[in-house]
Image (cartoon, grey):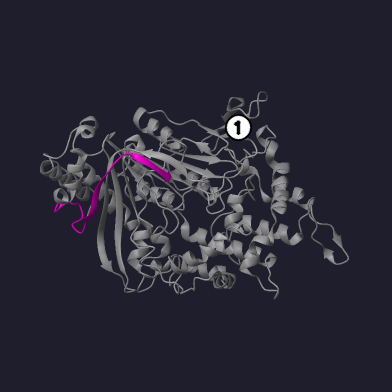
Amino acid sequence: MPHHSRTSALRLSVATLLVTAAPLALSTGAQAAEADLKGRCLALEKVMSGHWPDASTRIVSATPQPAGPVTLPPMMPGAPGTPVQLPEHCEVYGILHERTGVDGQAYAIRFHVRLPAAWNQGFFFQGGGGTNGEVGNAIGPTLSDTPPALAQGYAVVSQDSGHDNQRNTDPTHGGTAAFGFDPQARADYGNASLKPVADAAKALVAAFYGNAPRRSYFVGCSKGGEEGMVFAQQHPEEFDGIIAAAPGFALPRAALAQAWDVQAFAPLAKGPDGQPSFTQFASAFSDADLGLVRDAVLEACDADDGAKDGIVGTFAQCTAAKVAPALKARTCAPNAQGAAKADGCLTPAQVTAITQSLGGPRTKAGQAIYSDWPWDGGVGAPGWRVWKLGIPDRVPALNVMLGAASLSSVFTVPPTPLPADPQSALRWQLGLDMDQVAGQLTATSATFPRSAWQDVSAHSADLSAFKARGAKLMVPHGASDPVFSINDTIAWWREVDAKQGGKAADFVRVFPVPGMNHCAGGPATSHYDAFGALVRWVEQGQAPDRLNASAGPDTPWPGRTRPLCPYPKVARYKGSGDLNSADSFACDL
């Protein structure tokens, strides 16, 4: 269906809903708060029957919920959750596109909506994460310390992207990544589920309140960041503002980079039989060893922003060549048996491994497959090592546990059945030929007429329709993200800027966070309110020239403040003033 036809159809559907639901709906948030929430909530199934934008949609349950406390899950493994107070609301579970896949499994797109009694006339789509497969809490985390979107009065939707981790798991085919063996489930995961859910949720909002949302926002990180990019690039009409943080918009290539990392570190993780062992992966580098790497980075690059403060503001210029002398100075001296490991030094093999890892995956001819990574002050932090190496006695290496299953099942054609045990996953990753697998990312077949790259990437630099709509896009990204390289995000932004004649910052801005790992954590000022800045940009025209950020209690400098600057600007020390105060720094080129 042409774009204008789809838009007209949705408007007609909403208009029909407004007429049908008129006795139940209310025109303003204040009136809605005073009305009988229970009655309107319980009537939704009947009101929506026959009026969904997609006829396959139905409500599974609609339940009035009183105000009360909940605990949001942490952004980092092992971190404490965040308690929040939720308002009185109507909680709705819905389902659409129920079907049987080519693998014989039952699939559907399930979504979760919360409709607050005191509505601010806004709509908030909550992005997913990882391989999704969970319907989400529909509370609307804002990726900051501010209250979630539901508590701010937004109607919120989350979704499972077309598969269910409980129903669609198969231990012989990658566990919860088994959905990748069904082409439609793979497409739904990548992009196809997003617009149907957005349209269904907006229709539900219109029916419940009596008018469509005044403003619509999307917020997500990681896979959720990829979903935000899908909306900006493929469905620009859906949202006024999008936060696509640490976007996994090159997921298949990044999954191959995880296998590259495994191959780089495996020689340091040998078991008693002399072969690489999953159980030994976390011991490839001790915390003290990674501290030496961080010391080398800081020695080489810390002062380049004008302040020697443990933050590499100019991370983009901190290259392997620049760090190499400082690493060499920390390399164990050779003896008669070679370079023996000792406290206070790195072996040549360790230096080789981390240099290979940060150099990014390449073909045998030396061509980059994904991206390299900056040498930043957050390399080696717990949020970095949990992916690359794992945390001893706590969390196994996620690059093996998650990376192998997703690459084998979801991001290659044909997919490869892989047992869910980690040692089998490790052996499979170690046996990969990078050139061959790189070809499988874009391959198609009779069963998979679309490649993994077509289904699960959103790397286009063409945002002309998004710009024409007047929408805004913010892209926060940690400089020490071990999953998706900020260098890839910066390269994409440069392409966008070139297409926009150097004016991309008028509607899209990337905000690097030096020291931050994947979505959170690391020695960084990683607490900031990007969502509030986005709302001000969209609704008041206040473009975010900087984000005020602070360091959390798990950093070397709790309470430190810094400006986060839109790329290509960096926070530079003014030459005087408190190094722990944002007032002492300015965003400059």
- Identify which residue, 231 or 494, lies in the foreground: 231
Q: Considering only vertical position in the picture, is 385 above or below 434?
A: above
Please check the rendered image and state whether residue 62 is part of the magenta-colored stretch, yes or no.
yes
Q: Which residue is pictured at 19% across the width and 35% down the height?
A: 35
- Identify which residue, 458 or 218, lies in the foreground: 218
Inspect the image, locate mark 1, and give the three-letter code of the amino acid beneath it.
Answer: Arg
Of the 4 image quadrants, the one containing the N terminus is bottom left
Q: Considering only vertical position in the picture, is 117 above or below 410?
A: above
Residue 365 as seen in the image, left or right of residue 417: right
Q: Residues within 10 Å of mark 1 (few under 14, many from 20)?
A: some
Of the 4 image quadrants, the one containing the C terminus is top right
- For the record, the magenta segment spans 49-71
Q: Considering only vertical position in the picture, is 563 above or below 46?
A: above
Residue 270 in the image: state x and y as whole percent. Answer: 68, 69
Residue 211 in the image: state x and y as whole percent. Answer: 20, 37
Q: Which residue is pictured at 47% across the width and 64% down the height?
A: 406
Residue 199 in the image: state x and y as whole percent. Answer: 25, 49
Residue 270 as seen in the image, left or right of residue 511: right
Q: Which residue is mark 1?
A: 560
Q: Which quadrant of the structure image shows residue 556?
A: top right
Q: Which residue is pictured at 70% across the width and 42% down the height?
A: 298
Q: Which residue is pictured at 43% across the width and 59% down the height?
A: 131
Residue 135 in the image: state x and y as whole percent. Answer: 35, 55
